[in-house]
Amino acid sequence: MAGDAGTQDRRVALVTGAMGGLGTELCRRLHAEGFLVAATHSPQNARREAWLASQQAEGIAVRAYELDVSNGNACDNIVRRVLGDLGRIDVLVNNAGITRDRSMRKMSQEDWYTVMGTNLDSVFNMTRPVLEAMIARRWGRIINISSVNGQQGAFGQANYAAAKAGMHGFTKSLALEVARHGITVNTVSPGYLDTAMVSQVPQEVLRDRILPQIPIGRLGKPAEVAGLVAYLVSDMAAYVTGANIAINGGQHMC
């Protein structure tokens, strides 16, 4: 694999759903930890150029790739491109996710399949093509970003909660398969974070219904989740695999 000159000795992290609030913090923290970062974003993302410019202005080098993570062939192609551009993939963070909230009585098949495609099918679509390169190096880290609602459920989120719960079943099975190859697979399940997505929740709902459920009494910070991920992708976390680590302010205690 060709790769850019000077990149062969640096580990590469591939982050999906990279231009949201959590995705941005993941890219920034992994860059700070010394990784070359490849970031995927949804097609026709209007924020792409502004996002890249803001990262570059702060000295954060990120390679951006447009990708529909629900499309398996597209994921195969992007993995090949990243390997060609950067020479290796050591870390995969499956962070892409969407919501289409409806009560079950109102939820359409499109609502169900769209959320499953982006939130759960994507984990298979991205993980399968990166495995061989990790196995060849006998080192790899796969982090699946789930949700507190995959653990406790949520009204109007049967699709989202099912997808996020399914991610951890995937994590446990794959962790068993690849442990002997030096690859760890873990799930991180954040609670409500201070991101643009959560800011769309009406303030009275946030104040009266969400924050009272959180013993710490505040929303989480994306940087706090990114710090946990930074540990899990490090050499120090080599004995952690198949775990689902909650980071939710005590909202749901396993």
Image: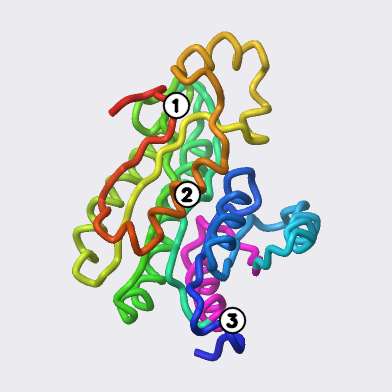
Q: Residues within 10 Å of mark 1 (few under 14, many from 20)?
A: many
Residue on which disc 2 sits: 117
Circle 1 SS class: loop
Q: Looking at the image, tell me whether mark 2 or mark 3 is earlier in sequence order.
A: 3
Circle 3 SS class: helix
Q: Is residue 73 magenta?
A: yes
In the image, farthest residue toward the front: 236
Specify the quadrant that holds the C terminus: top left
Q: Which is closer to the viewer, label 2 or label 3? A: 3
Q: Residues within 10 Å of mark 3 (few under 14, many from 20)?
A: some
Q: Report the residue at 46% width, 54% height from top.
A: 230
Q: Which residues are magenta?
A: 63-86
Image position of 163 with respect to 191: above or below: below
Q: Looking at the image, tell me whether mark 3 or mark 1 is earlier in sequence order.
A: 3
In the image, farthest residue toward the top: 208
Image position of 196 with respect to 79: above or below: above
Circle 2 SS class: helix
Of 230 and 94, the residue lying toward us? 230
Amino acid found under the numbered disc labelled 1: Gly
Amino acid found under the numbered disc labelled 2: Gly
Q: Which mark is residue 249?
A: 1
- Residue 147 at what x, y percent from top left? 43, 36
Residue on which disc 3 sits: 85
Q: Report the residue at 56% width, 79% height from top.
A: 86
- Residue 253 at what x, y percent from top left? 32, 25
Q: Is residue 122 magenta?
A: no
Judged by its main secondary structure, the magenta piece is helix
Q: Report the residue at 50% width, 28% height from top.
A: 107
- Residue 5 at what x, y percent from top left? 61, 89
- Residue 222 at what x, y percent from top left? 57, 41
